[in-house]
Image (cartoon, rainbow, N blue to C red):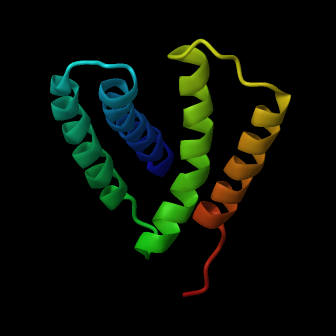
Amino acid sequence: MSILIYICAALAEIAGCFSLWAWWRLDASPLWIIPGLLSLVLFAWLLALVDTGGAGRTYAAYGGVYIAASLCWLWLAEGVRPDRWDAVGAAICLAGAAVILFAPRTA
């Protein structure tokens, strides 16, 4: 369930940040800020649902998912295909996130 929450959180964060990017950098309507802010609130709420025993661990593991999701956004929303180095970097980050999230803990 944590993986699904992380994926949804990444989409919410990227969409929220993109709405501000669109307003600021692409001269979109300031009304883009409203759904962007709502999306960022959704992002924070979703991350709060992950049970890792510590907020820092939740955020650290989320980082890998965010990196991979950002490269998917680059490809699907912006039309720029990630290169092999992007893919290698994302794979390394996802491996690190998996270690943080699924490692056996004694306490």
Figure check: 85 above or below 46: above
The spot of residue 39 in percent (x, y) is 26, 38
- For this orientation, the residue located farthest to the bottom is 107
Q: Quadrant of residue 47?
A: bottom left
Left or right, 49 with respect to 97, comes to left
- For this orientation, the residue located farthest to the top is 79
The spot of residue 88 in percent (x, y) is 82, 39
The spot of residue 101 in percent (x, y) is 58, 62
Left or right, 65 with respect to 55, comes to right
Q: Quadrant of residue 61?
A: bottom right
Along the line of sight, which residue is nearer the eye, 37 or 28?
A: 28
Left or right, 29 with respect to 44, comes to left
How many numbered markers are drawn?
0
Q: Where, quadrant-wise, is the C terminus in this rendering?
A: bottom right
Along the line of sight, which residue is nearer the eye, 19 or 96?
A: 19
Along the line of sight, which residue is nearer the eye, 81 or 31?
A: 31
Figure check: 15 above or below 94: above
User: Which residue is depicted at the point 65% across and 16% down?
Assistant: 80
User: Which residue is depicted at the point 15% across and 25% down?
Assistant: 31
Along the line of sight, which residue is nearer the eye, 80 or 3?
A: 80
Figure check: 31 above or below 54: above
Figure check: 24 above or below 58: above
The spot of residue 73 in percent (x, y) is 53, 25
User: Which residue is depicted at the point 61% across and 18% down?
Assistant: 75
User: Which residue is depicted at the point 71% across and 41% down?
Assistant: 90
